[in-house]
Amino acid sequence: MAAYLNMDTLRFQLFQVHGLENILTLPRFADYDAEAVHILLDAVKDFADRELYPVFREMDEDPVRYEDGKIIAHPKLGHIIRQGAELGLCGSSFDYDDGGMQLPGTVSTMNYYIMDAANNHAPGYMGLTTGAAELIVAFGSDELKATYVPNMLNGSWGGTMCLTEPQAGSSLSDITSTAYPQEDGSYQIKGQKIFISGGDHQHADNFVHLVLARIEGAPAGTKGISLFVVPKYLPGEGGELIDNDVITAGDFQKMGQRGYSTTHLAFGENGGSTGYMVGAPNRGLSYMFLMMNGARIAVGRGASAIASAAYHASQQYAKERPQGRRLNNDGQKDPNQEPNLIIEHADVRRMLLFQKAIHEGSLSLVTQSSVYQDLAEHGPEEDREKYHLLLELLTPITKTYPSEKGKEAIDNGLQVLGGYGFCSDFVLQQYYRDIRIFPIYEGTTGIQSLDLLGRKISMQNGRALELLTEEIVHEITAASQYPDLQRYAKQLGEKLTQAKGVIGFLLQFAQRGEYERFLADATLFMEYFSTLVVAWQWLKMANAAKEALVTGNTPYGEDFYESTLHTMRFFFTYELPRVDSLATILQNEEELTLLKGKEVIA
Amino acid sequence: MAAYLNMDTLRFQLFQVHGLENILTLPRFADYDAEAVHILLDAVKDFADRELYPVFREMDEDPVRYEDGKIIAHPKLGHIIRQGAELGLCGSSFDYDDGGMQLPGTVSTMNYYIMDAANNHAPGYMGLTTGAAELIVAFGSDELKATYVPNMLNGSWGGTMCLTEPQAGSSLSDITSTAYPQEDGSYQIKGQKIFISGGDHQHADNFVHLVLARIEGAPAGTKGISLFVVPKYLPGEGGELIDNDVITAGDFQKMGQRGYSTTHLAFGENGGSTGYMVGAPNRGLSYMFLMMNGARIAVGRGASAIASAAYHASQQYAKERPQGRRLNNDGQKDPNQEPNLIIEHADVRRMLLFQKAIHEGSLSLVTQSSVYQDLAEHGPEEDREKYHLLLELLTPITKTYPSEKGKEAIDNGLQVLGGYGFCSDFVLQQYYRDIRIFPIYEGTTGIQSLDLLGRKISMQNGRALELLTEEIVHEITAASQYPDLQRYAKQLGEKLTQAKGVIGFLLQFAQRGEYERFLADATLFMEYFSTLVVAWQWLKMANAAKEALVTGNTPYGEDFYESTLHTMRFFFTYELPRVDSLATILQNEEELTLLKGKEVIA
């Protein structure tokens, strides 16, 4: 089987970079030690090797299809989901009392990373079911929990998140699905939802849809949205399943992730779909958003994992393919020499190092956010607010950087193969197509960027940014102890100072009430700031590698750590300097993208 | 029908930016005036609207397939090719004596641009047939010309270029196809060729393959390669077609351009394929490379055209799709307001302006190279060397910039549509897939970049670079006359000075014999230098727009010219500053991508 990730990289991230052992000392995780985590990761890897990777190409070549009102997915999908559920992968972070394993979210993230790298089409079905169950567990009544959650966690029922509507897209304030109160306290739900991932397939006995809708007469905008459980089939008292008028109206055919259904659902078209409110009225969006950090980290995780798989596929090709010759010292090539392997050519090495720098930097960022989430939820009480703020600030970046830069990394991976990269016989083109949805999922890059610059940077008077700065300075200080890391520490310190200037420049527009101008280049600010954040992660990885080498704690061999240091240097040499131009662009005095009177885009 | 280009943009490029009327004064083009060119462009646009655009989606959804040793392409392809040939589009720049229209290459480029924008799958069949015929016309015997060219130009026979072999890829020096001399002066050809675009389909009566092969015993490397005409069927004396043992061994299934066949051909497997040498022995590669400038401009042209089509498709969506609301001065949105059209949002406007800046900048670059080619071939004798050098320098950039940045532009176009951009119901995902081959075609970006930095920058002691600098300074001087263009003129002047420093830094490695180091970052140098070159093109467009506005010569309406100026400002504000970071990266003192002893990419 082709490699799609390096397990040593995952272990290094968890234990040597991000100190998972500190998290395992928290009372909630008393049943786990490092050994237990290693065993679990190996079991998931084995599952991914056996069940997920072998059907990855098939799920693309023979995609999900819509037939007679039903979605037909890959024949093995049901088996995969049930096997995954048996391993505990649905709801693994839930409380024991709620049917979970009380696993740290960080470990759960790594489990899904392994699955996503092997096959990014299948794990989404499990991930969304977990997310839907999590909403019920967190905000639903005991009856809702008891009725729906067990079958979701054992893999026999699917779960979904129903947000998007055809007319509203990203603008959730324009949702029109309506909930009509019934005498028994339930609601009749009417409305159309689109882009519902995993919204139907032949392998689940039932689907539990978490639906955003407005109670009739609710206020306009996001303040009038409530959350409902709307099952495809209502469980009867005798365990029978009763049709609930949830129609699968279609499946969106897509460029990638073709094995993962993207459905159009119609609720209550023929009589009525019964729904049950989760929590209080008009609080739906705030519930959804509490889950959204996790969902956004999951998107970043998936993108990082696809980039890992593409890296390994292109690296394998580069190590096996002879082509062309290295230049002699006179600038010529000798055609009588044997051709070199293409991994010996500098341009190919650059493309591989770029991919490694991006996908490992992304994984580190995802792991960092997961650690913050674990600490915010289960860490010492007095630190939770701090980690919550750090998580809030990092979330839009963790969703976006792996998605945008992972796309670019895979583009390089495809290019390594030349013409073969474009051909269906090789997997790179599938990774290239699959990852393209990630900058769109769960709030597009534009939306995430508005969140980062418009809300997170200035939240609590910039407190989150202050905390992040402290974390970055901490790594800079640590790196300054190693003579050969000092120049990189210094470089990151300079960029941090530069960032203060850029942020100050932009904030003055907000202070003057020029909000459109303030946020006009938010997407470029995301590109700017996320590069800085990933440089911090690379310095953190370098510190960990250095410490391992100095102390001789090198379980993955010295080359592994040297390679980490080399890739850090690559990131600081080839990627980090790009922020300088972005700083110039962000501080431009023109206002070229604002709509002003006459339309000039012709 | 959806718009895929703006004809005013083409006319502006030809007549107001690039002075086609000067070319039309050359003796060779005496039969053409501006009016004739306008009529021809309109005829091609009409052809593209009628025949090409309507089958564009179908050619993707029902791709070329391989059945029983034959390639089956779209049923209308034969009709399209014959209609195109009737319009004179095969070999339109050839001499009248050779069956051509003696059209300026610049106009011919624009004709193909129109076709590529409407449907980038079909015109390749005509373009390659023209290229193959051009080689025969330029270097072949009168007999070869008489036997093969007329049927190629009338659209009944196809033509191809057979360079790549499975084991050699981009490394043409490793070609092993062999030509065995026969007593009658012909050769028996044996070998495998892959990635042969347009190499077979059911609509052509015959195929004329231009094949690179080694005469038995020829020297190793590129100096032992000769060029042969190898027809699929040998024309008999009575006009009958005799099988020539050219087997279509397969069709590569691809991520994009699925309506354009990419064949695997086997020559002489069962007895022998008769071939006829073109020109002299061992000169094959030099002949091929004389045509290669044209082929590389054609790749840049195609990529520019796809980016134009994607721009127009995303712009149309943005003008029709209401979603979200602009921010008020207090940073809030009023949910009771009607949603805005998304073209009113700054981030969407940025994505559209980016696409416009890239695709029009690319078209201007392609047009510039075509003008240089016309002048190098048919201009005043004393200037030809100058224009030849300019063309040589611009060719790798003209191939690469539209391909790489067009890909990025279309990525933005897809993003404008959000989730719909990823769905097969919308065309953006097809453009996204189609353009991905362009950075690979006709020498990958890596190969083009080695050509630019390794050969072209220093050719004739830097004479080409000197000439280009003069051309750029000419536009800077012109722009300095307009007060509101002065800052952009100054900015470009500063970058030109910076570029001298960067080039000097890199050349010192060549001077020291460190060739691998010299060329290690050639691809980044391409990104750097091509951005500068396109900034020059934007300044040239701005000068033309300004002159039009000042003199009142505004045939496309004042808004058209204002929009051109606005887009130039966008390019100088959002794109050109990126060269600063690239200059830093290119002047790095580390050597991170060179293979040195131990392998560190793990």
Image: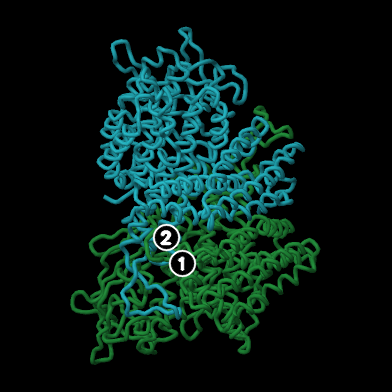
Chain colours: A cyan, B green
Q: Position of residue B544 (x, y in %)?
A: 71, 67
Residue receiving disc 1: B446
Q: Does A324 sit above or below residue A299?
A: below
Amino acid tagged 2: Gln
- Answer left or right for A17 relative to B114: left
Q: Chain of mark 2?
A: A
| Circle number at residue B479 | none
Indicate the position of residue B269 as horizontal and vertical percent values: 21, 74
Q: Amino acid at mark 1?
A: Gly
Q: Residue at x 72, y 49 (%)?
A: A591
Q: Residue furthest front?
A: A551
Contact, mark 2 vs mark 1 (Cβ under 8 Å): yes
Q: Quadrant of residue B345?
A: top right
Q: Position of residue B123 (x, y in %)?
A: 45, 66
Residue A5, position as x, y percentages in the image: 35, 47
Count of number-bearing discs:
2
Residue A299 as seen in the image, left or right of residue A99: right
Q: For the residue labelled by badge 1, is the local secondary structure a helix, a strand or a loop?
A: helix
> On the rendered image, what quadrant is the C terminus of chain A found in?
bottom right
Q: Which residue is mark 2?
A: A415
